[in-house]
């Protein structure tokens, strides 16, 4: 499962609050949704937290987001450890401040053996950049003689992406009612089911996650075929643990 956490700014504006308050409240939604995903048996959860384009926002807002991220990395480590959640990050991590990079490395290291849920934050992430980085990596391997160009398959390409080792999401949820994917996991969501919630992210709760999963269960996934896929993802009980 993957989620585009959108609508923090609009949530704040409609309440006459500064944008940063929307981001602060959005952290509460992250906490609740991660706990809910763990309870529902979801094995992989990827959250679009900060895009490369977000660096173009006002400096004051970016600084606040970085301080919020830093505090989150500290405050959530204990919960990750207690709930058997493995922490992961994708994106251009080198763009982030050194202090945050150090905390990311700490959280990844201390949760590397956890198995109940893999929580991935997309930080300084752009799917187009991810694809370009993957192409460059494969070109280097060809130049070094490690790989022949004719041996580059979809599987080899997927291994070169930031998400290597993470299954493609079965379900992509977008908060805030917007009908776009915002440069998120473009390669990985080729056959992903989409679900749009009208709620802004700060208002998104466990019940909304359950609504999305129940809607997903009603769909027939054809994967480009004329009949529903029999050997793919099965219809799930909310505690089956099969939803990626």
Image (cartoon, rainbow, N blue to C red):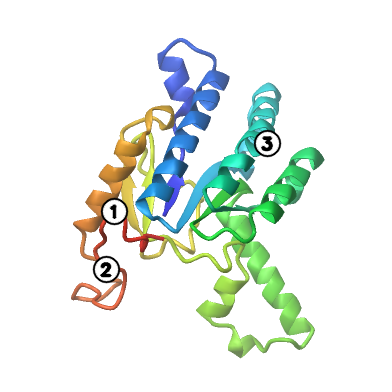
Does the CB distance between marks 1 and 3 fall below 8 Å? no
Nearer the N terminus, badge 3 or badge 2? 3
**Mark nearer the N terminus (1 vs 3):** 3
CA gap between label 1 and label 3 equals 30 Å
Relative to residue 213, is residue 139 depicted above or below? below
The residue under label 1 is 238
Q: Secondary structure at mark 3?
A: helix
Question: Quick one: SS at disc 1?
Answer: loop
Q: Residue at x 59, y 83 (%)?
A: 152
Give the quadrant of residue 235.
bottom left
Please state which of residues 169 and 189 is positioned toward the viewer in this rendering: 169
Label placed on residue 74: 3
Q: Identify the element where label 2 is drawn.
A: loop
Residue depicted at x 55% and y 24%: 24
User: Residue 163 location, x and y as percent?
Assistant: 57, 62
How busy is the neighbourhood of tag 2: few (under 14 within 10 Å), some, or many (20 plus)? some
Q: Residue at x 26, y 61 (%)?
A: 236
- Packing grade of label 1 (10 A; few <14, some 14-19, many >=20) is some
Q: In the rendered image, which residue does mark 2 sit on?
A: 234
């Amino acid at each position: 499962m993957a989620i585009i956490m959108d609508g923090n700014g609009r949530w704040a504006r409609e309440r006459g609050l500064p944008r940063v308050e929307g981001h602060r409240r959005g952290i509460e939604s992250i906490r609740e949704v991660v706990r809910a995903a763990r309870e529902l048996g979801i094995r992989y959860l990827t959250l679009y937290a900060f895009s490369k384009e977000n660096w173009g926002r006002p400096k004051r807002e970016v600084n606040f987001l970085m301080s919020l991220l830093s505090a989150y990395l500290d405050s959530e480590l204990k919960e990750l450890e207690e709930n058997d959640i493995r922490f992961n990050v994708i994106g251009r991590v080198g763009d982030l401040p050194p202090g945050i990079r150090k905390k990311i490395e700490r959280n990844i290291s201390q949760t590397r053996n956890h198995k109940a849920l893999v929580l991935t934050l997309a930080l300084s992430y752009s799917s187009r950049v991810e694809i370009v980085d993957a192409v460059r990596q494969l070109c280097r391997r060809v130049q070094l003689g490690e790989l022949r160009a004719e041996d580059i398959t979809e599987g080899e390409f997927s291994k070169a992406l930031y998400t290597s080792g993470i299954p493609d999401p079965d379900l992509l949820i977008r908060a805030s009612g917007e009908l776009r994917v915002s440069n998120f996991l473009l390669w990985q969501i080729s056959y992903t089911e989409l679900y749009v919630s009208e709620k802004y992210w700060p208002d998104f709760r466990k019940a909304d996650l359950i609504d999305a999963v129940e809607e997903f269960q009603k769909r027939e996934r054809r994967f480009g075929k004329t009949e529903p896929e029999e050997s793919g993802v099965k219809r799930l009980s909310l505690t089956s643990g099969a939803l990626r």
